[in-house]
Image (cartoon, rainbow, N blue to C red):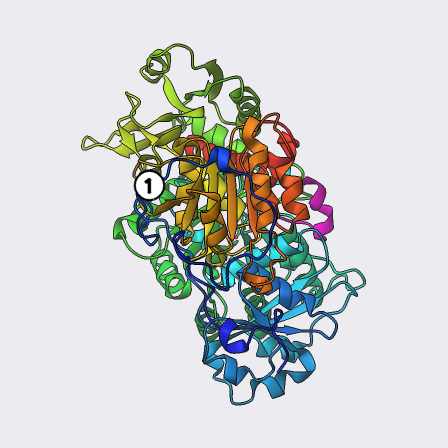
Amino acid sequence: MAPLLDETPVSNVLCDPPTSMSANSSASASTPTSSSPLNIASIVSDPDQPSASSTVRNGVHDTISSETPSGTVVVVFQPGQEHIVHMVAEVLGKPWTTETAISTLSKTDVVVAGVVTDSLDRSLQDCDRAAIILVNTHSVEDGSAPDDTLSERCDYEFLYSRTPFLRRDLTRFLSLILGQTRPHEDLRTKTRTNFISTTFPDVHAALPNLDILSVGSDAVEIRVDLLVEPGCEGKVPSLKYVGQQLMLLRQHTELPIIFTTRCTKENGKFPMNDPSLFFKYLRRAIQWGVEYVDVELWLPEDIRRRLAEVKGNSIIMSAFHDFSGTWKWTSSDASRIFNESAKYGDIVKMIAMVSTIEENYELEYFRSTIKSRGSGPPLSAVNMGQMGQLSRALNTVFSPITHPLLPMIAAPGQLTAAEINEALHIMGQLPKRDLYAIGSFRSTPQSMFMEKCLNELGLPHSITCIDRGPKGSMESILLQPSFGGASLNPPVATSTSHIPILSDAARAIGLIDTIAATSSPTTTGTNSTRFIGENAAWKGIRATLTRDYVPSAYQGRAAIILSSSESDASATIFALRSLGVGSIYTVGFKAYGPLAVGLEPFTSIQSVKLVESPFVIVSALPPEKSLLVQPLLRHYRSNGRASPHSTRGKVYLDLTSGARKGDPLGVARSAGWTAYGAEDVTAWTTVETLRLLVGQNVPFDFVRMASGRSLF
Ligand SMILES: O=C1C[C@@](O)(C(=O)O)C[C@@H](O)[C@@H]1O
């Protein structure tokens, strides 16, 4: 048997990572052995804070979604590419082995096992196939493609090249295939969703503008049929080429991808004489962990059913297009098509070419009859052609959009996100709102950025930056009749008057950083607007923490939070609890609010030394105290002898902003931590804030690019 990394007996390692130990427990094998000096006494709070069970997750019961994957993840790797097995284990926060008899492993708890391609047959002997998730991994760096039979044998396939994006792409892939992130769950709750139909023959051409292209989009469509493989012009691009193109696209956008093989009869280039070709490509897309797969309705039912059976965590978009110009939304065929699509589709897309404006009204009537059913998959329906443009503004579910920077439009009559918003505004569907960035000078750059986004998206709203000023001045803004929402930096307490409704997160955290407008229908048929106090910061923290680790990597693991006050730490506590962390040890503050239960304050240097190695440390210290975290980072450095590699201290998040003392991020990186600064959290939080304020998606990469390294 190949040794596990730390040479711990296999029986000890093939089990869940150690659960948290109380600060009062005596030292054990998992106690860090590093003897770095600790000098944090000056920030340790009084020991009178009662401690309670770390399993209590009050306030966040609705947000926990970090299930541990069930089954052994077997990573098939090419000779010489063992590093990919380590990386999978890292991302999952699990120990790994290159144990070759999988049958013995699958009876134990979750573990990552690497199997080199040549020994797959031997390794799988007597193995319960249902107990393992077989992931083929293949480096495309040398231009090669995986062996087709090997790909087909595996459940999933990860194509990679050694770029700075590899880790992030792997995390996203694993999170999706293991069901730990479900992007569609989030998108289905949005009032409107758009996707950008890219029409590039080669994804490379899209990369320089991808960030700007996808402002206002919730997903990116790759039109596989429009890809042109060099040397194979006029032919269906090979799976090898498609795989590389998809990998490239996914490495450059955090948005979910829609994989489309549009047929020749429906304005695409995929030949229709061999439906099994569609199955092959779409099945492979599912194996590649693509979030949305477009399955055309004309395909034989057997193919559609089989795709639905193997879809895993991908979402099937059933697609029907009619270009005849004679097809009618009022015909009985419309309902028949919807029902047939709904058999295997999670979303039903119906699109027809029209030549009169009335056909948009007919579509709206059809839409309302489908809505009135109250169940079944959502309908995404638009008309093509200039006369159909109205329907593109009225459709709310995954509206296909274009952008001036694309080489061509994907279908006649397509509009940009800005055009749709402008049309909605003119029709009275998107009234102008006065938005505010309320706070200190810190909110100015953020509000300037938001203003640019409003312009880019063609939104009619205004945004005004104002200082919070004396007590009561904010309240007077909230009472203005044209008030349309606000971002608050710094956040305000949930007790602030005139914000009567709170989200669950804001209530638990005790802070509001966004006031969002929600409109709901009244009994008289009109819409009434209400304002809700939200907290976007915790989502920014969670999104940052799950960039390089899947959510379950945090489950049951210890965390340390350093802060000068409970309020500076509360969004972090909430985010960590949403990831199901184990014990949370606190340094520098006492907690009394709804999130206090289960926190264990470090009471002395001794208690720091007695607890298990934390998986994550978050510092929310003010700049003048920022260096106080450095001894902890050194103490729990990642080369501690006692823990296996894949379970030792991992993530350091530094929420301190402004001129600071010391260089905690530098110290963390050199001590082996994956370290993030406040800028990442701020960018993710801005994504969430824009979504709450104006219901539009502005991708993280765009925010990060536009904000530079130091802005807001
Ligand atoms: O299904 C659709 C919709 C579409 O045909 C349109 O009409 O905008 C554009 C296609 O790229 C996409 O796959």
Question: Residue 676 sits in which quadrant?
Answer: top right
How many residues crowd around disc 1 within 10 Å: few (fewer than 14), some, or many (20 or more)? many
Quadrant in which the N terminus is drawn: bottom right
- Provide residue 7's location: percent of width, then percent of height: 61, 73
At x 61% / y 40%, what residue is drawn? 701
Q: Is residue 155 visible?
A: yes
Q: Depth check: 311 or 302 in front?
A: 311
Q: Depth check: 515 or 357 in front?
A: 515
Which amino acid type corresponds to the residue marked 1 in the rendered image? Ala
Relative to residue 401, is residue 35 depicted above or below? below
Q: Which residue is mark 1?
A: 596
Q: How many marks?
A: 1
At x 59% / y 42%, what residue is drawn? 631
Residue 209 among magenta residues: yes
Q: Which residues are magenta?
A: 197-210
Residue 527 among magenta residues: no
Quadrant in which the C terminus is drawn: top right
The extreme left residue here reads 523
At x 42% / y 24%, what residue is drawn? 486
Query: Left or right: 336 with respect to 182?
Result: left
Query: Left or right: 93 with respect to 342?
Result: right
